C-alpha cells in the first residue's frame, strides 16, 4: 500500500471521528513531529503551503456537498 492510499484512508477515518478524538490525533501528530524535529507550525507555512491547503479544503468541501439546488430553490430563498 502506497503512502497516498494510506493518507486517503487516514483522512476518511479522521473525518468520522468525534471532535475530542480528532484533537487527540492532532496532539499525537504534533508529538511525533517534535520527536523527529519536523515543524508543523502554521506560522512557518509559506504562500505555496497555504495555497495548497486552501485548494484542498475547497475541493474537499465541494466534493462532500451532495445537495443539489435548483433555480426554483434559489427563487424561494431570494425574494426581491
Image (spheres, rainbow, N blue to C red):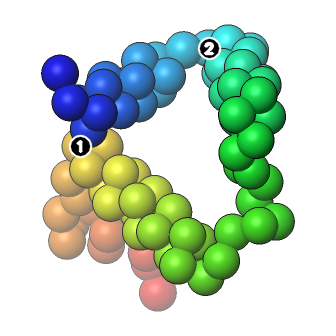
Q: Residues within 10 Å of mark 2 (few under 14, many from 20)?
A: few
Number of dots carrying numbers: 2
Q: Residue at x 51, y 63 (%)?
A: 53
Q: Is residue 6 left or right of residue 42?
A: left
Q: Using the rendered view, name the quadrant where residue 10 is placed.
A: top left
Which residue corresponds to mark 2? 18
Residue 77 higher or lower than 63, as above or below: below
Foreground residue among 11 and 32: 32
Foreground residue among 21 and 52: 52
Residue 19 visible at all:
no
Foreground disc of the pair 1, 2? 2
Q: Using the rendered view, name the quadrant where residue 36 is placed.
A: top right
Ranked by sequence position, the earlier of labels 1 and 2 is 2
Distance from disc 1 to disc 2, alpha carbons, whole Å, reads 21 Å
Quarter in which the N terminus is drawn: top left
Report x, y in % for residue 27.
77, 24
Q: Residue at x 69, y 69 (%)?
A: 45
Q: Is residue 70 left or right of residue 21?
A: left
Report x, y in % for residue 61.
39, 52
Which residue corresponds to mark 1? 66
Residue 43 higher or lower than 2, as above or below: below
Q: Residues within 10 Å of mark 1 (few under 14, many from 20)?
A: few
Report x, y in % for residue 46.
65, 77
Report x, y in % for residue 67.
26, 46
Residue 46 visible at all:
yes
Would you say the residues marked 1 and 2 are in contact, meaning their CB atoms lie under 8 Å apart? no
Amino acid at each position: 500500500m502506497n503512502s497516498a492510499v494510506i493518507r486517503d484512508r487516514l483522512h476518511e477515518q479522521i473525518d468520522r471521528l468525534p471532535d475530542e478524538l480528532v484533537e487527540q490525533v492532532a496532539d499525537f501528530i504534533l508529538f511525533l513531529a517534535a520527536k523527529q524535529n519536523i515543524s508543523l507550525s502554521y506560522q512557518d507555512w509559506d504562500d505555496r503551503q497555504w495555497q495548497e491547503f486552501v485548494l484542498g479544503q475547497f475541493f474537499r468541501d465541494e466534493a462532500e456537498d451532495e445537495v443539489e439546488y435548483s433555480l426554483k430553490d434559489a427563487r424561494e430563498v431570494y425574494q426581491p
